[in-house]
Image (spheres, rainbow, N blue to C red):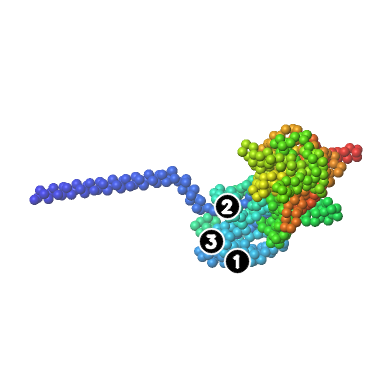
Amino acid sequence: MHDDQQKREIINRRHFSFRLNLFFFITFALFSVLIVRLAILQFVEGPTLSAVGLDKGTRSVKLPPIRGNIYDSTNYPIAYSTSTQSLYFSIQPEPKLAVAKENARKMAAKLLEVFNDFGDPAKKMTVDDIIRQMDLDFSRNIISTPRRIKSGLTNNEIAYFMENRSSFKGIDIMEESVRNYDTNSIAVQLVGYLKKYKGVRETVDFYKEKTKEEDATLQYLAEEDVGMDGLEFMYQDILRGKNGLKTYPVNNAERIIGPMQITTPEKGSDIYLSINKNVQLSTETAIMDQLKKITKSTNKYERAVYAQTGFAVAMEVDTGKVVAMASMPDYDPNIWSGGSISQEDYENFSNILSNGTIRTVYGKYSEKERSEHPSSIVPLGSTMKPLSVLIGLNEKLFTTTEVYPDTGVFTFGKAGYERKIKNSQNKIYGNIDGAQAIEHSSNPFMAAMVGNRLVSRGSVKGKSSVEIWDDYMKQFGLGVLTGSGLPNELKGVIDYFDSAKRFSSQSALIFASFGQQGRYTTLQLAQYTAMLANHGKRMKPQFVNQIKDSDGNVVQAYTPVVLNEVKFKDEYWKEIETGMSKVSSQGFEGVDYSYRRKTGTSEQDVAKRTAENAVFIAYAPADKPKLAVAVVVPDGGFGSYGASPIARKIFDAYDQEIGLYGVPKKKTTDNANANGAK
C-alpha cells in the first residue's frame, strides 16, 4: 500500500515536470515567433508601413495645369491660356457638421469684406454668392474637396490673404488657366471649345474613362475646363498637361500640423496648326460677302434668295495640310468663357456651333423649317463628272477619242415610264468626247456613256454594277471617313444602293453619274479634288504642323500620310484635265496662274420645291498643283455664280501668304516696291 503511494507520487512529479517543461517550451516558441515577427515588421515591412502611415497623415490638393496654346502656321495665337489666381476654400472638420457649416458662413462674411475692400469692382460678389460657391450642402463636392470661391484675384487681394493667412483657415490661393480665343474668330468650329469636366464626365465616354485614372497628376478636377469639340477635344491629352500637388501633414482631426510640399503643375504642349490665319480669314470673309451678294443680286443666274450658309476647305495637294476650313456664319468662341454658355447665346448660335464642313449644319431655321432647306451635306452635282469620266475610261466603257451625239436629252426606262435626262437650260452640244462633256457639263453624256453602259455591261467578277461604282466612290473618299480624326465627322450619305432596290440599277447609276446619288461633306469634296490634282493619291487631311512641349522642344512633327492610291493611265488623267481647264467659272477673270476646275449645281427636293446647291472644285497651278479648294453653298444656285468667286479669293489669299509657286506673292510685291523706292 505504502509502495503504491510512493509510486503515484513519483509518477505525479514526473507528469508535473513534463507539463512544466512543455509550458516553458511553448512559451519560448511563442516569444521566438514574436521576436521574429517584430524583426520582420521593423526591417522588412517597416518602410512600407511607414509610407502607409505617412499617407494616412497627409493630404494632397491637386493644382490644375496650364492648358497648352493653339497657334496658326505663322505662330499667331488662336487659342491661348492665361494664368489667373483663384481663391479656394476647404470646409474645416468639426465634431458636428452644423458647427462646420456655421463657421463656413462666418468665413463667407469675412471674405466678402476683403473682396469689397481690395477686389475688382467688376467681379463683385455677395455673401450669398460666396456661400453658394462653398457648396455647404455638398451637392457638387464631398466635404474634403476644396471649393473655388473666386477667380481673377487682384494683387491687393492676394497680398492681404497672404499676410493674414492665420485668420483665414481653409483658404488657399491657386494659379489656374483661363482659355482665351482670338476675337477674329479664326476657324472656330475647327478649333472647338471647352466645358466643365464635372458636366461631361458622366456623358462623354472619353471623360468617363478619366474617372478611373489612378495617377494623381493625371486626374481631372471637377472645375477644370476640358475640350468638347474640334481640336480642343481631339488633342485634349496633349493640351492638358499634368497636375501639380500641394501635400501637407494632418492630424487625426484633419488639421494641418506642418509645412506643405508643392509639386509644380506641368503645362500642356502647344499645337501649331497648318491653318494660315490670313487665308482662313479671307475664306470666311469671302463666304459672307458672297452670301450677301447672291441673296440680293438682280442677276437671274446669280440670285439665290434662300442661301444662308457657306462652307469651304483649302487643302494642299501633296501634303494633305488644310490651310483653311470655314463653316459660315461662325461665332465668337469666347461665349464659352468659364466652360459654359448662356441660354441666350445658345439660342442665337446653336445652329452654327458645329463644323459644317464635316457635319450636318442648317441655316437659322426652326425644326419645322429645316425640312424646307438643304443642309451642309449636299449632292456633288456636276463636280462628280471628272470622276465619272475616269470610271468610264478605266472600265473601258468608252475611249478618249469616242464621241457621243449630245442632243440635249437622254431617255431611259420602260415604255410609258420613260425618264428624260437633260442638260441645264436644255442646251445641245452635238458630238462631244469625255473632255468636252466635262467642259460643257453634259448630263446626257454621263447618263448614256457611264451610268447606262456600266449597268448594261452587267456584273464583273461577281460584283454588280452598283458595287463597282461604290468601290470607286470609296477609293476617292466619298462615303467613307476622310481620316482626319476630327470628332463626329460624317461619312456622308449614299443613295445609289437604296435607289437600285427601290427602282433599278439603271436609274441609280444614271443619276449617280452626274452627282445626284450621294451627299457628301465639304472636306470629302476637298480630299477628292486633291486626288484629281495629284493623280490618285488620297491624302489624310491634317491640321497640325507640329507639337511642342512647354520648353519649346518638338515632340511631334508632321508627316504626310497617303491613305490609298488609285492607278489610272496618264491619258485618262489628261482627258479630264483638258475638260477641267475649259470650264466656265465666274470670278476668275484676270488670274495670273493656271487652274483646273469644275462647277456643280446639285438638286435636292425639299418640302414643295427643288433646292439648287452651288458647288465648286478647283486646283492650281494646273501644271504643278499646289492647292485644292472645295466650296459648297446650300441653296446657292449655280456653282459658277454662287461658289466659284469664293474659291478665287481663297486661291488669291494663299498665293499672297504662301505662294502657289512656292514664294508668297506679298514678299515679291514688297521686294519690288522696295527696289522701286530705291
**Label 1 vs label 2, nearer the camera:** 2
Q: Secondary structure at mark 1?
A: helix
Residue at image mark 1: 106
Who is closer to the viewer here, 215 or 344?
344
From the viewer's perspective, is 50 left or right of 613? left
| Residue 222 percent across, percent down from the top left | 60, 55
Q: Quadrant of the C terminus?
A: top right
Residue depicted at x 28% and y 45%: 25
The CA distance from mark 3 to mark 1 is: 15 Å
Q: Which mark is residue 208?
A: 2
Q: Residue at left 85%, top 39%?
A: 592
Q: Nearer the viewer, residue 347 or 467?
A: 467
Foreground mark, 3 or 2, reads 2
Circle 1: residue type = Lys
CA gap between label 3 and label 2 equals 30 Å
Q: CA distance from mark 1 to mark 2?
A: 37 Å
Horizontal and vertical percent position of residue 160 = 66, 59
Residue bearing the label numbered 3: 93
Q: Tag 1 or tag 3, which sits nearer the N-term?
A: 3
Instruction: Give the quadrant of residue 174.
Output: bottom right
Q: Position of residue 123 (x, y in %)?
A: 70, 61
Q: Give me the residue at 70% from left, 61% from top.
A: 368
